[in-house]
Image: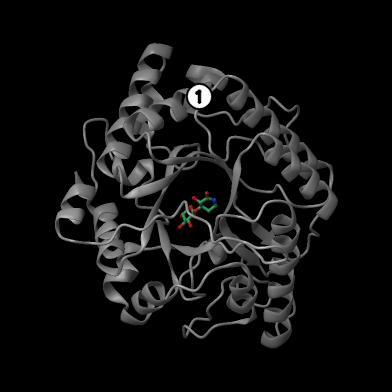
Amino acid sequence: MLASSLAAAGLPCLDLSARAAAGPGVLARAVYGAAVRGDALANDPAYAEAVAARCRTIVPEGSLKWPVIRPNRETFDFGDADRIAAFAGRHGIGLRGHTLAWYGGMPSWTDAITSRAEAERVLSEHIERVVSRYAGLITSWDVVNEPIPDAPSSPGDLRPFVWTRTLGADYIPIAFRAAASADPTARLVLNEYDVEFAGARFKGKRDALLAIARRLVDSGVPLHAIGLQAHLFADRSIDRDGLQAFLREIRAMKLDVLVTELDVVDVSLPGDVEARDRQVAEMARAFLSAVAEVIPPSTILTWGISDRYTWVPTYFTRPDGLPNRPLPLDAAMRPKPLMAVIERYTRSAS
Ligand code: XIL
């Protein structure tokens, strides 16, 4: 209904699924976007301008998560998400949705869900309500986010939380089917992190993600793409061969790839700003070049656009106390070398 009211107001609707035609040797260029915060869009004009000028798509960083939308069982609160959707509409920017089934920060009222039937009802009803509200406007959804534990014991290992406790692995197809039925045109994404690095733990993550994707594809569940979050850590290395082998399997399943949450955690890098920014950009270049060689991503989003607003210091503070610099614009909204790397793989917003 929000989509139709925006359309009625004559606001543009972007076709985000269309990729730039790529001739031989030419990079297929992705749509660039970023995760955004509604309060900052409303109160910080420099930030809002940077988002409007540089992004062709945006995703609410937190406003579509369960704790915001479902403070209690009875209430659906869409205020924050609607304001972000209106910003996107005003500026002719596309919109992604994040996320419908995620272990992180589930509201405590869901602890009382114990039976399978109740769980299926609550999960499906939530997805129907949220996805149908933004049908035609949110063109791509992170339906299931981070299903795999940090160190999976086997490819079938899933994170324990309300939906695995009540529905087991079935929560994943249930979520995708509910999303597809609420908006048959939306692109549905399975989103995960720690997929790109060298080491047994990360190989385990790739194997587990492939197992989930294969099970969905083989049983005809509507899954369209894999989202690589790409929270890159400067003290790890990209497993180019392992990542590319993984992506070839994804390609064989005819799935698309999105980079959904790119940033570089810089806690281990030198304090010197120039050296740090160069190494941050190099890490992203190593990652994006490995991905694009196998499947050019249709969309590349960073998790935030400016170092002024980033989740990184909440979880990863630098030992020298200097502010983190994980994102393509610095805290003064000036582009950093990371932005130049992203621009090699994306189309300009204008
Ligand atoms: C993070 C937000 O950025 C924070 O503001 C919030 O406090 C916690 O969640 N992977 C994800 C995102 O899929 O939803 C997380 O976002 C970052 C890691």
Depth check: give the residue in front, 104 or 300.
Answer: 300
Residue 86 shown left or right of residue 16 in the figure: left
Residue 325 in sight: no
In depth, the one of 320 and 244 nearer the eye is 244
Residue 142: x %, y % from top left:
48, 43
Q: Residue at x 71, y 47 (%)?
A: 195
SS at badge 1: helix
Q: In the image, what residue type sits under mark 1?
A: Pro
- Circle 1 residues within 10 Å: few <14, some 14–19, many ≥20: some
Can see residue 155?
yes
Q: Is residue 43 above or below residue 110?
A: below
Which residue is disc 1 drawn over? 173
Asked if 267 appears above or below 83 in the picture, the reply is below
The residue sitting at 65% across, 36% down in the picture is: 149
Instruction: Locate residue 141: give its quadrant.
Output: top left
Residue 125, percent from left and from top: 31, 26
In the displayed structure, would residue 125 be above or below residue 130? Answer: above
Q: Quadrant of the C terminus?
A: bottom left
Q: Nearer the viewer, residue 334 or 311?
A: 334
Residue 335: x and y in percent read: 54, 83
